[in-house]
Image (tube, rainbow, N blue to C red):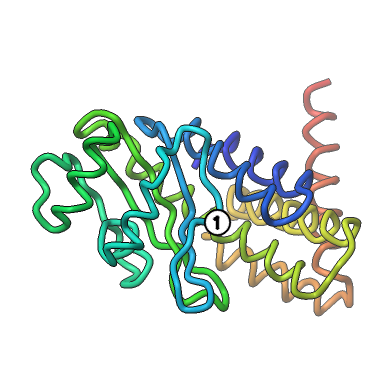
Amino acid sequence: MTPEMSETLDQAMVRGNGLDTLLRDLTDRAVRDVPGAVACSITVRRADRLLTLAGSPGLPNGLDLRQYEYGSGPCVTAAETGTEQYVPDLAAEDRWPEYARYALAAGVRSVLAVPLDLEGEPSAALNLYAEDANSLAAGLSVARVFAARVADAVNTALRIERLGQSATDVRTALLSRSVIDQAIGILMARERIDAAQALDRLRRASQDRNVKLRDLCDQLVTRTAHGSSGRRK
């Protein structure tokens, strides 16, 4: 995922007015950011049934619903098995014949369903649709990273909703995560270590100095920014 994509997702969460708004924004962004995608939806199992929590404006009516009715399809399979389902060409797909016929009639030729790892949600998937065969091939890696980021965003939103936190608490939590991510990136570049090692060092420093992790990271990011500004002068 590009830094620009990560930033737009964080901004969407900070501006979000609830989970529904966040999900709609994420499906819209998926269509813009994943090459080949013309529509996107998010499938989640709730109360023992699959349903679409959000869909982009370009999503054909009934495209997800038909899968739920048939009990089969790439989105259903991805959500219930936790395995990615990529269909380069529905015209050559024989696993879900009824759904394939319906999707082709609706103008969909290719589908990618990426499972989402949501806390407390047994089944979930990010679904991407394309009008031409193989047109999602160039966007597979981007879609997978985007799906992981979406799961992270939705998990944060769900935790906030469950705790009943205020909008101010939401923004504080999201901005804290953002500054911690920035500090991890600084240590990775400076020390040539991976993300897990960087986070471990930050946590140990936080404990040793008896300083909150978020405050420690904020100090590091601020010092780095000021140092960079000074070098440019």
Q: Position of residue 129 (x, y in %)?
A: 35, 40
Q: Which residue ends up furthest to the top in the rendered image?
A: 233
Q: Position of residue 68 (x, y in %)?
A: 35, 62
Which corner quadrant holds the C terminus? top right
Using the image, determine if residue 72 lies above or below residue 134: below
Q: Residues within 10 Å of mark 1 (few under 14, many from 20)?
A: some
| Left or right for 99, reference 2 | left
In which quarter of the view is residue 187 placed?
bottom right
Q: Position of residue 25 (x, y in %)?
A: 63, 41
Using the image, determine if residue 1 lies above or below residue 70: above
Amino acid type of the residue tagged 1 in the rendering: Leu
| Left or right for 21, reference 172 | left
Using the image, determine if residue 230 lies above or below residue 162: above
Using the image, determine if residue 24 lies above or below residue 159: above
| Left or right for 16, reference 152 | right
Seen from the viewer's position, the closer of residues 74 and 107 is 107
Number of numbered discs overlaid on the protein picture: 1
Q: Position of residue 128 (x, y in %)?
A: 38, 44
| Left or right for 34, reference 83 | right
Identify the residue at horizontal 45%, vertical 50% (top origin). 145
Identify the residue at horizontal 46%, vertical 78% (top origin). 48
Identify the residue at horizontal 60%, vertical 34% (top origin). 4
Which residue is under mark 1? 53
Secondary-structure class at tag 1: strand
Identify the residue at horizontal 13%, vertical 58% (top origin). 95
Seen from the viewer's position, the closer of residues 61 and 83 is 61
